[in-house]
Amino acid sequence: MNLAVWQVLVQEPQFVIALRHTLISALGSTLLALALALSTMMVLYPSTVWQWLTRRLALLLAFPHAAFAVGLGFLLAPSGLIARLLAPVLEWASPPLWLTPQDPYALSLMLALALKESWFLLWVLAAVLQQQGTISALQVAQSLGYGRLQGWLQVLLPQILPRLAWPLLAVMAYSVSVVDMALILAPTTPPPLAVLGWQWFNDINPERYAMGSAVSLLLMLILVGAAICGWLSFKVLQVFNQAPSGKRWKSVHLPIKPIWGVGIVLSGWLALLLLLIWSFANHWFFPALLPSTWTIKGWSQLDWSLLGNTVVIGVASSVLALMLVVAWLESIKQRWDGVSYWVLVLPAVPLVAAQYEVVIRLQAESTYLALIWSHLLWVLPYVLLVLASTYRGFDARLSTSARALGYGYWQVLWWVKLPILWRPMSAALAVGFAVSVAQYLPTLMMGAGRINTMTTEAVALSAGGNRRTLAVYAVGQALLPWLMFMLMNSLAHWQARDRVGLR
């Protein structure tokens, strides 16, 4: 890539505004997600509401990004639920002139990303708090006269924030290169850089293709720049916190508010509820809170082949990922696990472009094999992330006992170790399936329009005006991961029916 490509890119009329949309949506959503997650933790931990919230995070995490974006669009739109609730109070007879969800500053996209990624950060925080002994540290701080807020800010957060570095980088990497949510919620003239780069990648003009490559590199540079700024900000905070004055903030109190926990999950449930209502709505005029007539016409028009493609690719990629992860955990030392996580902290657009180049060279475009391979790149790290700690924590004395009774390596693995670890393995399989269902760019590029899934169809329909059909495909996309979680949970219960210790 030569300098002329960068000059053409900078002179492109859409470039500056597209860059602005990317910076607002990516940086804003990452900071807002961090603020939401930390404030929720500080307000709720270690109450029963926190336990209630963390038990529901798995279901929220399985909510595909595109389906959540469609549901949130139904909430924020001028004829959405918020406007309908305000209509009687403000005496609106017609929808207000809101520029949502595709507002000119990409704020709707920023909000959607922040809400979705705050669930992921809360899930990480729940795991970190279990390991850190935070309750005792908080009690010690309070016994020394620190209030709840001061204890969190001056004692606990400096210990917790370094553990969030990699998850925050993953959140930023996803936000800076997101395409499916941007196509639904972001402005279209011009769209954010990731969408613009992806469009140029699909252009037959070599100059446009080179500009797409330049955008991919630019997204990487934005990510690196954001990571450096975040690291410097943390170092500055450390300097200010090195010599605290010792003054106690006795007047500041941070009470536990259950409504905070309900509010953080409310957007997810409202989005799903609106998708369900719209999928059965026949006539729903503003400002009515519910449709006047209902129909199953949308569901009768569902293309079941798309559902089949989604399931086949999801099951194949997640099963293959599980087998590879088990082989990895059996043969590779723990310190190398981080190698596979690099995929999660890199922008998706350049990775998918590289995958596409390989597929083109192998002449495997529009094949199921190419799609499964492309999904595997994202599914495998998540399966490893979910399974690694439990698998490596397996009690080795059980294997030793089995070998003392004459079992070989494969017999111990097949008859002792894998049955005992079936529950976490089934959970990892369900997570991998959910990750596969949510993949948009790899499916679009490798499928080349000949193999589509529920995700690609939902995003394509978002540009049209038929909300009922769009809702049907979004609901279908959202339900598949949850059905897989229920199936895996049922299989785990069935497998443990005669084994008391596994229940």
Image (cartoon, rainbow, N blue to C red):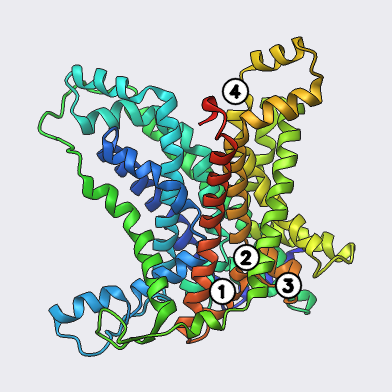
Left or right of 422? Residue 53 is left
Q: Amino acid at mark 3?
A: Ile
Front-most of residues 92 and 222: 92
The numbered mark at residue 459 is: 1
**Residue 51 position by quadrant:** top left
**Residue 494 position by quadrant:** top right
Residue 292 visible within the image:
yes
Q: How far apart in space, not on screen, are marks 1 and 3 (Cα)?
A: 15 Å
- How busy is the neighbourhood of tag 4: few (under 14 within 10 Å), some, or many (20 plus)? few
Which marked residue is nearer to the observer: mark 4 or mark 1? Answer: 4
- How busy is the neighbourhood of tag 1: few (under 14 within 10 Å), some, or many (20 plus)? many
Q: Which residue is mark 3?
A: 451
Front-most of residues 17 and 185: 185
- First reached walking from the N terminus: tag 1 or tag 3: 3
- First reached walking from the N terminus: tag 2 or tag 3: 2
Q: Is 97 drawn above or below residue 442 in the view shown?
A: below
Q: Position of residue 476 (x, y in %)?
A: 53, 68
Q: Which residue is mark 4?
A: 393
Q: Are marks 1 and 3 in contact (CB under 8 Å)?
A: no
Front-most of residues 352 and 287: 287
Q: How far apart in space, not on screen, are marks 1 and 2 (Cα)?
A: 8 Å
Q: Are marks 2 and 3 in contact (CB under 8 Å)?
A: no
Q: Position of residue 75 (x, y in %)?
A: 34, 72
Q: Position of residue 124 (x, y in %)?
A: 46, 39
Left or right of 180? Residue 445 is right
Q: Amino acid at mark 4?
A: Gly
The numbered mark at residue 440 is: 2
Which marked residue is nearer to the observer: mark 2 or mark 4? Answer: 4
Q: Position of residue 22 (x, y in %)?
A: 51, 64
Q: Residue at x 52, y 51 (%)?
A: 486
